[in-house]
Amino acid sequence: MNKFYEALALVASEIEDPEKNKKVRSGRIQWEYADLPSILKAVRPVCAKHGISIMQSPSVIDKQLHIKTVVRYKDGSHITEESTWPCETKDVQKIGGLITYYRKY
């Protein structure tokens, strides 16, 4: 696991902030953010360089959206985290939007 943690430290030190390529306006407030493809574009090459892959698997169970994230090192060691978010809709397009939104977090 030590080599895995060393690789994670290298990744953290080399990743540059993703491009903020989206804008949102709500009343008088406006902000910019990086969408998921922009985040992945910044993260994937650096992770690959150090033997790290990231996989996310979403599922909806009992009005809860579960996103399981696995960060795996080339030697097979890994860290798994699962987050749970509310999901009251049955609309497939809305669920897809929620998945994209929550994967960033």
Image: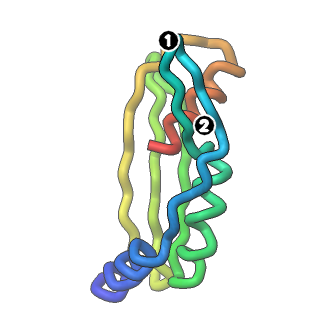
Q: In front here: 5 or 57?
A: 5
Q: Position of residue 30 (x, y in %)?
A: 53, 26
Residue 41 percent coordinates (x, y)? 65, 61
Residue farthest along the front direction in this orientation: 28
How far apart marks 1 and 2 lie (CA) works out to 16 Å
Tell me which numbered mark, 1 or 2, is placed earlier along the sequence.
Answer: 1
Residue at far right of view: 93
- For mark 1, does the 10 Å Cα neighbourhood hold few (<14), some (14 to 19), or many (20 or more) residues? few
Q: Quadrant of the C terminus?
A: top left
Residue located 57% across and 57% down the image: 18
SS category of the residue bearing label 1: loop
Q: Quadrant of residue 13?
A: bottom left
Describe residue 53's horizontal placement relative to residue 21 as left or right: left
| Residue at 45% in and 64% down | 71
> CB of mark 1 within 8 Å of CB of mark 2?
no
Instruction: Please tell me which residue lies in front, 88 or 50.
Output: 50
Q: Is residue 41 above or below residue 30?
A: below
Seen at 63% across and 27% down, the residue is 97
Tell me the number on the disc at residue 100. Answer: 2
- In which quadrant is the N terminus drawn? bottom left
Amino acid, disc 2: Thr
Residue that lies at the very extreme toward the left in this rendered image: 2
Q: Which residue is mark 1?
A: 88
